[in-house]
Image (cartoon, rainbow, N blue to C red):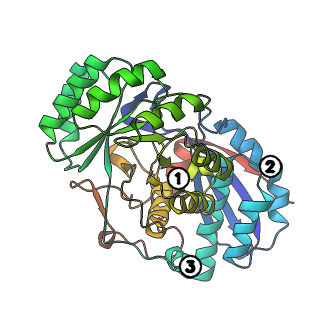
């Protein structure tokens, strides 16, 4: 397979619910769509969600990275899956940001599967489960706003909920009471998004453990590894101290494991640089006896949702998944048939055609164009 044209789109789709957390608030999705065309006229689409507070990338930097390195990509023949893996994990390493790598990789995998006329999951040697349970996400908001938001949440029978919180313990306890009354069987975890100090964490965690919460995601900024170590040493036997923003690369995952910084990880395809790199990090974590979930950036479209399902199928020890909100969150998705959760908070793989060639989504380019600004990378 040889790529003869690359095009990027900076995608912003209005969301029905404004995303809000301690370190980011936005009313629209923020993504880059990568489109590749092969010499045989096959088109592949990829997606990434650059976040400056995670990988240091922006939408602009992703587009610039791809433009600067397109010649390197276009010179290579990609006859098999191993060649794509070498490109992503070797040639692109240290040259292109993780989000940019992800967008390119997914587009190449989509095109490669279509050229081979084999489902991508079959090429990877995996098999989908019948159903995947997803998590209901509760944005950072006031108690009164949560009461108003609750009817939307109750459209789904979530088995897992994640609530984004700040330092206000009283508000957090009030919100927990509301959610536990509305979803008595659901397991609830907290996403702090770097809002706590070590002192606040030590004060709040015992009280929250007593209320049935045992997972605490990214309580401190990524530079506070010592605070994470102390928190994990103190509460790690009874609680999951989860890392998100702090883990991006294989090297960062190795450091966090080796120094016992945490005992649980939130993996996201876009922040790790695509499917191959996510699989390598998953393997490292599980080989060291630790656990992880598969997360998502807010506003992901069906491209990343489909990619996430491939990773989920190849990583059997992941039991909790996030994302897949599709048009429940976005005013529109870019696929003809969005891949999204049903009323049970699940994806039933038998009800969607994931076994078709490529990533399993039919992209409507007119929708992509409508909600983005294209940047053409011409091939000589």
- Position of the N terminus, as image quadrant, is bottom right
Q: Earlier in the sequence, mark 3 or mark 1?
A: 3
Could you say which is closer to the camera, residue 178 or residue 26? 178
* Cα–Cα span, label 3 and label 1: 29 Å
Label 1, secondary structure: give it: helix
Label 2, secondary structure: give it: loop
Q: Is residue 146 above or below residue 8?
A: above
Q: Earlier in the sequence, mark 3 or mark 2?
A: 2
Could you say which is closer to the camera, residue 198 or residue 180? 198
- Position of the C terminus, as image quadrant, is bottom right
Q: Position of residue 47 (x, y in %)?
A: 57, 52
Mark carried by residue 123: 3
Looking at the image, is mark 3 or mark 1 nearer the viewer? Answer: 3
Quarter-of-image position of residue 129? bottom left
Q: Which residue is mark 1?
A: 366
Q: Is residue 276 visible?
A: yes
Left-right relation of 214 to 104? left
Label 3, secondary structure: give it: helix
Q: Is residue 229 above or below residue 237?
A: above
Q: Which residue is found at the position 25% from the left and 22% from the top? A: 145
Q: Which residue is found at the position 76% from the left and 45% from the top? A: 65
Quarter-of-image position of residue 174? top left
Contact (Cβ within 8 Å) of mark 3 with mark 2: no
Q: Which residue is found at the position 51% from the left and 67% from the top? A: 359
- Mark 2 crowdedness (10 Å alpha carbons): few <14, some 14-19, many ≥20: few
Q: Position of residue 110 (x, y in %)?
A: 59, 68
Q: Which residue is mark 2?
A: 95
Q: Is residue 363 visible?
A: no
* Cα–Cα span, label 3 and label 2: 27 Å
Could you say which is closer to the camera, residue 200 or residue 273? 200
């Amino acid at each position: 397979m040889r790529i003869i044209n690359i095009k990027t789109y900076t995608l912003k789709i209005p969301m029905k619910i404004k995303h809000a957390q301690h370190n980011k608030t936005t009313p629209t999705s923020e993504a880059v769509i990568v489109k590749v065309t092969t010499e045989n006229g096959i088109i592949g689409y990829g997606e990434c969600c650059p976040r400056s507070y995670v990988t240091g990338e922006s939408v602009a930097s992703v587009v610039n990275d791809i433009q600067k390195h397109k010649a390197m990509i276009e010179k290579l023949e990609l006859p098999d899956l191993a060649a794509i893996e070498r490109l992503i994990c070797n040639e692109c390493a240290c040259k292109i940001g993780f989000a940019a790598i992800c967008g390119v990789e997914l587009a190449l995998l989509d095109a490669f599967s279509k050229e081979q006329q084999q489902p991508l999951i079959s090429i990877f040697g995996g098999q989908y489960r019948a159903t995947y349970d997803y998590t209901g996400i509760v944005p950072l908001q006031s108690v009164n706003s949560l009461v108003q938001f609750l009817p939307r949440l109750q459209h789904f029978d979530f088995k897992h909920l994640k609530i984004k919180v700040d330092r206000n313990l009283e508000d957090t306890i009030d919100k927990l009471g509301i959610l536990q009354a509305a979803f008595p069987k659901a397991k609830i975890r907290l996403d702090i998004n770097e809002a706590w100090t070590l002192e606040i964490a030590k004060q709040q965690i015992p009280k929250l453990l007593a209320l049935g919460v045992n997972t605490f995601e990214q309580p401190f900024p990524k530079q506070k590894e010592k605070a994470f170590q102390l928190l994990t040493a103190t509460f790690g036997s009874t609680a999951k101290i989860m890392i998100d923003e702090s883990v991006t690369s294989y090297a960062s995952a190795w450091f966090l494991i080796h120094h016992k910084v945490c005992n649980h990880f939130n993996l996201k395809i876009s922040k790790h640089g695509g499917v191959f790199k996510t699989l390598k990090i998953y393997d490292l974590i599980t080989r060291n006896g630790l656990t992880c979930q598969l997360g998502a950036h807010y506003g992901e479209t069906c491209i990343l949702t489909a990619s996430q399902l491939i990773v989920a199928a190849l990583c059997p020890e992941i039991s909790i998944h996030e994302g897949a909100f599709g048009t429940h969150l976005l005013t529109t998705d870019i696929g003809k048939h969005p891949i999204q959760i049903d009323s049970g908070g699940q994806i039933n793989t038998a009800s969607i055609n994931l076994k078709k060639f490529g990533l399993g989504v039919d992209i409507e380019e007119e929708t992509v164009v409508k909600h983005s600004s294209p940047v053409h990378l011409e091939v000589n």
